[in-house]
Image (tube, rainbow, N blue to C red):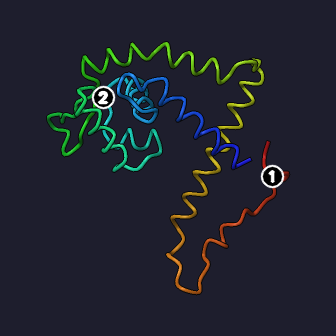
């Protein structure tokens, strides 16, 4: 199933690229614009990084590209220290509005034929998969770098089988 999830990710990104390419966006940059819309106040680069589970460098690169296209702007707030905030420009707001219907189309085609009960179950499963991966990542960060004969990642094998996990 892990391979199928990678394939789904790749398909989603490829379709996202096609849906918004005419606006000079990629699927990843489109997701970042959507993330900006979920905040009541402009988020920091760190907030966006944590929200998208992307490295700060990756988010910073995407923000730089969006900034070069006049879609977002970075700014600081008095008393905010070295924090860098990000917000949509008026042009970015236009892009967001222009791509809104494409997002709705994407979601409706992705979820076509699923009942509300199936959608709820799928959301629960996706949430659990994300939690599992976040725990795995945290465990990997605790492992020392392997030496030439060490295999510390072997210690990360699951303690339980899927049948033994909580529902």
Could you say which is closer to the camera, residue 67 or residue 51?
A: 67
Residue pictured at 30% horizontal, 37% vertical: 63
Q: Quadrant of residue 105?
A: top right
Query: Badge 2 local density, few (<14 within 10 Å), some, or many (20+)?
Result: some
Residue at mark 1:
162
Which element type, helix, strand or loop, lies under badge 1?
Answer: helix
Residue pictured at 42% horizontal, 33% vertical: 26
Residue pictured at 18% horizontal, 34% vertical: 77
Residue 8, placed above or below residue 137: above
Q: How many marks?
A: 2
State how far apart marks 2 and 1 are (Cα). Answer: 40 Å
Q: Quadrant of residue 22?
A: top left
Residue at mark 2:
42
In the rendered image, residue 17, in percent from the top left (x then y), is placed at: 47, 31
Q: Which mark is residue 95?
A: none
Looking at the image, tell me whether mark 2 or mark 1 is earlier in sequence order: 2
Instruction: Pick the quarter of the image with the C terminus.
Output: top right
Which element type, helix, strand or loop, lies under badge 2?
Answer: loop
Q: Is residue 88 left or right of residue 133?
A: left
In the rendered image, residue 135, in percent from the top left (x then y), is placed at: 60, 54
Q: Is residue 160 left or right of residue 78?
A: right
Q: Is residue 103 left or right of residue 1?
A: left
Residue pictured at 60% horizontal, 76% vertical: 152
Residue 95, placed above or below residue 65: above
Q: Is residue 84 left or right of residue 143?
A: left
Q: Residue lying farthest right?
A: 163
């Amino acid at each position: 199933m892990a391979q199928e999830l990678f394939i789904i990710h790749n398909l989603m990104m490829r379709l996202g690229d096609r849906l918004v390419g005419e606006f000079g966006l990629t699927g990843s940059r489109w997701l970042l614009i959507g993330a900006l819309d979920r905040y009541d106040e402009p988020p920091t680069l760190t907030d966006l990084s944590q929200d998208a589970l992307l490295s700060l460098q990756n988010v910073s690169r995407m923000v730089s590209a969006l900034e070069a296209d006049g879609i977002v702007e970075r700014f600081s707030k008095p008393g905010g220290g070295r924090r860098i905030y990000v917000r949509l420009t008026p042009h970015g707001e236009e892009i967001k509005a222009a791509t809104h219907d494409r997002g709705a189309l994407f979601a409706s085609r992705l979820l076509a034929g699923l009942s509300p009960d199936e959608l709820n179950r799928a959301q629960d499963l996706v949430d659990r998969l994300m939690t599992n991966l976040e725990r795995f990542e945290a465990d990997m960060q605790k492992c020392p770098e392997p030496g030439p004969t060490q295999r510390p990642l072997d210690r990360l094998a699951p303690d339980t089988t899927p049948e033994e996990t909580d529902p």
